[in-house]
Amino acid sequence: MLPLLAALVGGSGCVEGNRVPGATGACDTREAPLLGCGPATGGAALASIRDACSKLATCGLVSIENGRRSFEDCVNDFESYPIDALPGILACIGRTDCAGLQNPNERNVSICERFGR
């Protein structure tokens, strides 16, 4: 019985890499953009979110100075979108011209962001 117990305890310490089965990785959480997770680690980099907000500012959907939706509001919005929807939203913004980003239902949010709400 003792050898069986030792084998079970000794064998349970062997986990592939540093990942624990069933555990959620940091880049698979809403905090991923804040942690700088990039495509290689599974999350969107904060730089990608800032780039998207910069494009939205260029298109008039975000105000750099004293607007209804500030640049910081934009970044905060993106950080609150579901982690599985964020890559699609960022890709949509990257591929869409300013005229196509206008949302007829909400003046300060792009049409692409409807997937995150």
Image: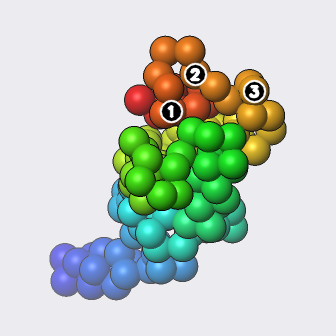
Circles 1 and 2 in contact, beta carbons < 8 Å: yes
In what quadrant of the picture does the C terminus appear? top left
Q: Residue at x 62, y 40 (%)?
A: 60
Residue 47 placement: quadrant: bottom right
In what quadrant of the picture does the N terminus appear? bottom left
Separation (CA) of disc 3 from disc 2: 9 Å
Q: Is residue 16 visible in this depiction of the protein?
A: no
Q: Residue at x 47, y 22 (%)?
A: 106
Above or below for 68 versus 116: below
Q: Secondary structure at mark 3?
A: helix
At label 2, counting other C-alpha atoms closer than 10 Å, the crowd grade (few under 14, some 14-19, many 20 or more) is some
At label 3, counting other C-alpha atoms closer than 10 Å, the crowd grade (few under 14, some 14-19, many 20 or more) is few
Q: Nearer the viewer, residue 21 or 11?
A: 21
Residue at image mark 1: 109
Q: Nearer the viewer, residue 5 or 89?
A: 89
Q: Secondary structure at mark 1?
A: loop
Q: Which residue ends up furthest to the top in the rendered image?
A: 104
- Rendering coords of residue 25 (x, y %): 44, 64
Q: Is residue 103 visible in this depiction of the protein?
A: yes
Check disc 3 and give the amino acid type.
Ala
Residue at image mark 2: 103
Q: Secondary structure at mark 2?
A: loop
Above or below for 25 versus 93: below
In the displayed structure image, the side of residue 57 where residue 10 appears, left or right: left
Residue at image mark 3: 99
In the displayed structure image, the side of residue 21 where residue 107 appears, left or right: right
Q: Residue at x 53, y 46 (%)?
A: 62
Q: Residue at x 39, y 63 (%)?
A: 31
Check disc 1 and give the amino acid type.
Val
- Rendering coords of residue 28 (x, y %): 46, 57
Q: Which residue ends up furthest to the left in the rendered image?
A: 1
